[in-house]
Amino acid sequence: MSGSDSAMGTPEAPAADLGRSAAAYGLPDEEIVAEIPVYLTQKLEKQLHLLQYPQKIGAVRPGELQPRTARIKPIHGQIELDIPLDVHSPMYNKRRGAELGEGIADDGRLLDTTTLVSVNIPKSSEYLVGVMQGGELHLTAIDKVTQLRPSLKYLDRIAEKDLAARKADDSDDEATEKKDVKAQTVQVTVRSAQAEEALRQQQNSIAYMQQRLEEEPWSDLAYFDVGTDECNVARADLVADNREDLIHSTDPSEYLSLVIGSTTPDV
């Protein structure tokens, strides 16, 4: 396939041809009521991310999860969204919110934001974005699938503060208290040299990757919801400009298998 856009299929069939059998296309024998031209565009295929909210029940409505701030680490593709919380809601526990707020600031503020952080997941199937316009279907492949899950870094900061306070108390007590030394049973595990080396390489690799991720600076993102002018401009890029036919070597059933996996029902 050459160029930024390509088309597949044929123009809409005349009314007299709509009732022909689908068997001619290698599909289940059902009546065809319409034929829709399908166009493939590549203008945004390296920029589209599918964001999933596994802890959200139901569909995400426009404006429902609009972030206060958004940022990305472009090299690693990590995304964070700061979603505001309604601290005036009768369902919000202000006492607990004040306790958890210690993990974001020392000024006694309430926890008024939840941060969603991206977790990349392997694609189990191919995803496409489709736009219907003028009786035509325009498809763009999605580059990456990402799940957004709550970040609990504020709990880590609270735990660090508690640990520092306990250490300070222990330092004061060491001068006045004599600690008992008790015998303990120690279990010794012996690993082979090969296993130790494999474990060391694995730990070093994970630690190295985590270090590289943490060292990459954040870049601010501008968030535009559905219906905004910026969103409509991006949507226009999902429509193909090229109407040339795509020369293909697969029949419809093979093409569907390539796009969505096997079309054969599981037995």
Image: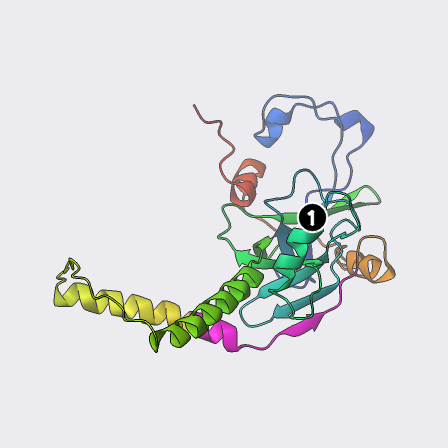
Amino acid type at image mark 1 = Asn
Q: Residue furthest front?
A: 176
Q: Which residue is mark 1?
A: 93
User: Compared with residue 262, is residue 265 higher up or lower down, i.e. above or below?
Assistant: above
Which residue is drawn at the image coordinates 50% and 53% (left, top)? 121
Residue nearer the viewer, 200 or 260: 200
- Is residue 217 highlighted in magenta? yes
User: Compared with residue 103, is residue 146 higher up or lower down, i.e. above or below?
Assistant: above
Q: Is residue 6 left or right of residue 15?
A: left
Helix, strand or loop under label 1: loop
Q: In the rendered image, which quarter is residue 67 located in? A: bottom right
Q: In the rendered image, which quarter is residue 11 located in? A: top right
Which residue is drawn at the image coordinates 69% and 66% (left, top)? 108
Residue 19 seen by the camera? yes
Q: Is residue 13 left or right of residue 197?
A: right
- Is residue 74 highlighted in magenta? no
Question: Residue 125 at x, y = what percent?
Answer: 52, 45
Residue nearer the viewer, 175 or 117: 175
Tell me the crowding category of disc 1: few under 14, some 14 to 19, or many 20 or more residues within 10 angstroms, Cα based: few
Quadrant position of the C terminus in the picture: top left
Q: In the rendered image, which quarter is residue 253 located in? A: top right
Q: Is residue 131 left or right of residue 53?
A: right
Which residue is drawn at the image coordinates 83% and 62% (left, top)? 230
The residues colored magenta run 210-224
Question: Residue 231 at x, y = what percent?
Answer: 81, 58
Question: Residue 107 at x, y = what percent?
Answer: 69, 70
Residue 141 seen by the camera? no
Q: How many circles with numbers are drawn on the protein?
A: 1
Quadrant position of the N terminus in the picture: bottom right
Residue nearer the viewer, 110 or 215: 110
Question: Residue 33 at x, y = what percent?
Answer: 75, 26
